[in-house]
Image: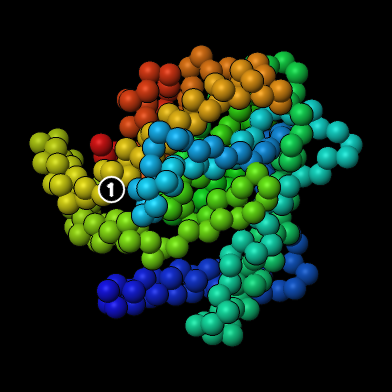
Amino acid sequence: MRKTGAAVKRAAAGLLTVLAAAALVSCARKGEPVPALPEPTGSYAVGTMWLSFTDPGRPETFTADPEDHREIAVRIWYPADVGNGDRPCLYAQPGVLDIPAQGFSEEMRAGLERLEERLSSIRTHSYKDARFASGGPFPLVIYTHGYWAGMNQSTVLMEELASHGYVAASIGHPFETNSVTKPDGRVVRFDPRNPEFMLRGRERQAGLPVERAIVETADPEKLDALFREYERLRPKTRESLAIWADDIGFAIDAFFELNAGDERFRGMIDLDGVGVLGHSFGGAASGQAALDDGRIAAGINMDGLQIG
């Protein structure tokens, strides 16, 4: 257990070192212009809001509490009517990096603080809780992030989709994302020392040689054997794939309920043929969900190894 804990600390330190280095490079000069996100090319203004749904039929397997049920966070971007009093959201809220008080050099902490300041100074093209635009219903596209990434991972893509008349929804998969944002603005962070999460990390290390062989192999018969071996080595990863695919299906259930009963959404979402897309492990989950759920009409796996 001590060895595992030390490994987690080394991994966290390595990640923070990379972030600090990026901060030092990008924020070296005071007065440098604030980065601007690409402006969406569609004809609609973009609204955004944060939602949260609890599935009473699924226990949360990442905790020991038998009363704990699976709760997913969802952020949506959608075509909106923006008023004069509406203001665009920040790309990230202050405090997003949760900079540790101890264990890192003064230079690293300073770099992280500058990075956080940088991120929280960027304004998006999304307006919080703006009203839906007229002209609906609008088709639903569900996005799922990469492993240990977050709900804001593809903000630019989500804004672009919404500007062209889609409701674009990003799912935060708890315990396998760094954090989620609740509807009241609270940021909930997840501990990488969670035992279930650490089991998946050890599986990933064990499967890396096979993963490299898959990437380097073109022979279909060899690939089939390699994929079977990869899945044998990673049972917890297969479990996560099923959980994420179920999260997508549960999100679709929730949107059906919102569309029928919530005055903010009533009749505004076209659920006749949902699209799914995701990056990396989220791409694999999107592919699996598209096979599992007949309500999904199209799916895109962006740069993800398609297991399952």
Specify whether residue 23 is in view: no
Mark 1 lies on residue: 237
Q: Nearer the viewer, residue 236 or 230?
A: 236
Position of residue 199 measured from the top left corner of the image (x, y, whole percent): 28, 59
Q: Nearer the viewer, residue 179 or 66?
A: 66
Helix, strand or loop for disc 1: helix
List the single residue furthest toward the front: 67
Quarter in which the N terminus is drawn:
bottom left
Q: Nearer the viewer, residue 104 or 303?
A: 104
Residue at 56%, 34% in the rendered image: 169
Position of residue 150 measured from the top left corner of the image (x, y, whole percent): 51, 50
- Asked if residue 86 lies left or right of residue 186, the reply is right
Specify whether residue 299 is in view: yes
- Asked if residue 299 lies left or right of residue 169, the reply is left
Q: How many marks?
A: 1
How would you rate the neighbour count of disc 1 (Cα within 10 Å): few for under 14, some for 14-19, many for 20 or more?
Answer: many
Position of residue 141 measured from the top left corner of the image (x, y, whole percent): 53, 28
Q: Which amino acid type is shown beneath numbered disc 1?
A: Thr
